Amino acid sequence: MEVKEIKAFGTEAAEAPLNQMSINRRIPTPHDVEIEILYCGVCHSDLHTVRSEWGPSLYPCVPGHEIVGKVVSVGGHVSKFKVGDMVGVGCMVDSCRECQYCSEGLEQYCEPGMTGTYNSPDQHLPGNPTFGGYSESIVVDENYVLRIPDNLDPAAAAPLLCAGITTYSPLRHWNVGPGKKVGIVGIGGLGHMGLKLAKAMGAHVVAFTTSESKFAEAQRLGADEVVLSKNAEQMAAYHGKLHFILDCVSAEHDINAYLALLRVDGSLALVGAPEHPLPVAAFSLIPGRKSFAGSMIGGIAETQEMLDFCAEHNIPADIEIINIQQINEAYERLLKGDVKYRFVIEMASLKK
Ligand code: NAP
Ligand code: ZN
Ligand code: ZN
């Protein structure tokens, strides 16, 4: 297959820092859209993956799955997009399109497995991994490309492609809305979107943070109440009070302390994906018929629905724009919870 060499930022090994490298992109097939990447958000999953925290990753590894850019060329059979359109690509670039989940718009749970935007075997370039958005451009089948609404700032829209949909999908699935008391745990990239979205859906929102510096800001982001989770007294005040909790924490923490805050029949959904298991006590669940669940991103149609919801309710992400050369430093700050609330790489910096 014909390829084009482009600039990217990635790593050759779990222990190595990210550096500039060259990668190959396929020449667009008739169903492909070629996108010049303008912005790419920095998700904590990028860090987990480049460091092989979830098991061995494929190297070289070029992360980035919060991609916004401009269409620069389209294949002959593309009907949904044209040159010049502002588009997005999230965490997946393909799936089998035939299984029950794909046909129901749940491509993220595709039976043979979706193709991740990075760190998946590339179906088009056998023997290579897929490479993500820390790069000049990307080529994606039009069915896995999203439309960025005109009134969203493209840089602040980038984090919606993962942080936005990963919080939107479970909030919808567990029927968050008026009359529901909802907890959002861990106010990072995902958590701050969770606050904004749950508030826009009409719920009563309680933020749980370990960071005193985020305490006041959580209210601006949409929290009706804020709890410093290290403070046992503040936590005890919410025992048995919440209908639903969305846990967005990237590291080990005591899940039983949060299950205790659920009402009878309440659910806690984990979207945070720490490297090590989180022990759950039987009696955290049994007495209140409680559910402990998980959720992974969202389907393509639901991602478009979320983007349109954010456009309608004027919900951008709160971002700090960085150059690609600052990425290793940004990862260190991410590990300290020191980001308000999402780093977004201005990809023009790759040309420097
Ligand atoms: P992030 O921006 O780094 O935010 C994580 C937040 O968790 C921090 O800001 C901090 O919030 C809290 N936290 C961090 N370390 C903690 C600790 N030791 N104890 C308690 N709280 C801690 O990360 P993100 O990009 O939002 O991603 C969050 C997690 O979701 C990651 O594990 C990521 O891989 C995962 N993820 C999952 C999906 C999915 O489909 N399920 C999709 C995307 C990401 P406070 O300062 O408020 O305490
Ligand atoms: Zn992500
Ligand atoms: Zn499928």
Image (cartoon, rainbow, N blue to C red):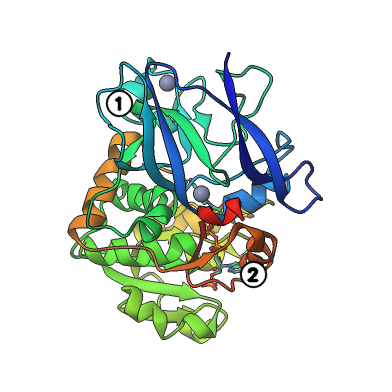
Badge 1: residue crowd in 10 Å (few <14, some 14–19, many ≥20): few
Kindly identify which residue carries mark 1: 104
In this view, the residue in front, 198 or 348, is 348
Task: Identify the disc placed on residue 183.
Answer: none
Q: Is residue 196 left or right of residue 111?
A: left
> What's the residue at 31%, 21% (across, down)?
103
**What residue is rendered at 34% in x and 35% in y?**
300
Q: Can the viewer see residue 337?
A: yes
Q: Residue at x 50, y 39 (%)?
A: 137
Q: Residue type at mark 1?
A: Glu
The label shown at residue 333 is: 2
| Quarter containing the N terminus | top right
Answer above or below: position of 77 versus 301. above
- Check disc 2 and give the amino acid type: Arg
Among the two numbered marks 1 and 2 on one chain, the one whose residue lies closer to the N terminus: 1
Q: CA distance from mark 1 to mark 2?
A: 39 Å
Judging depth in this view, the residue of 99 and 134 nearest the camera is: 134
Select label 1 or label 2 by which is in front: 2
Q: Is residue 131 left or right of residue 159?
A: right
Q: Position of residue 175 (x, y in %)?
A: 25, 51
Residue sticking out furthest to the front: 352
Spot occupied by residue 12 in the image (x, y as percentages of width and height): 77, 41
Number of labels in the image equals 2
Q: Is residue 305 above or below residue 79?
A: below
Is 112 placed above or below 264 here?
A: above
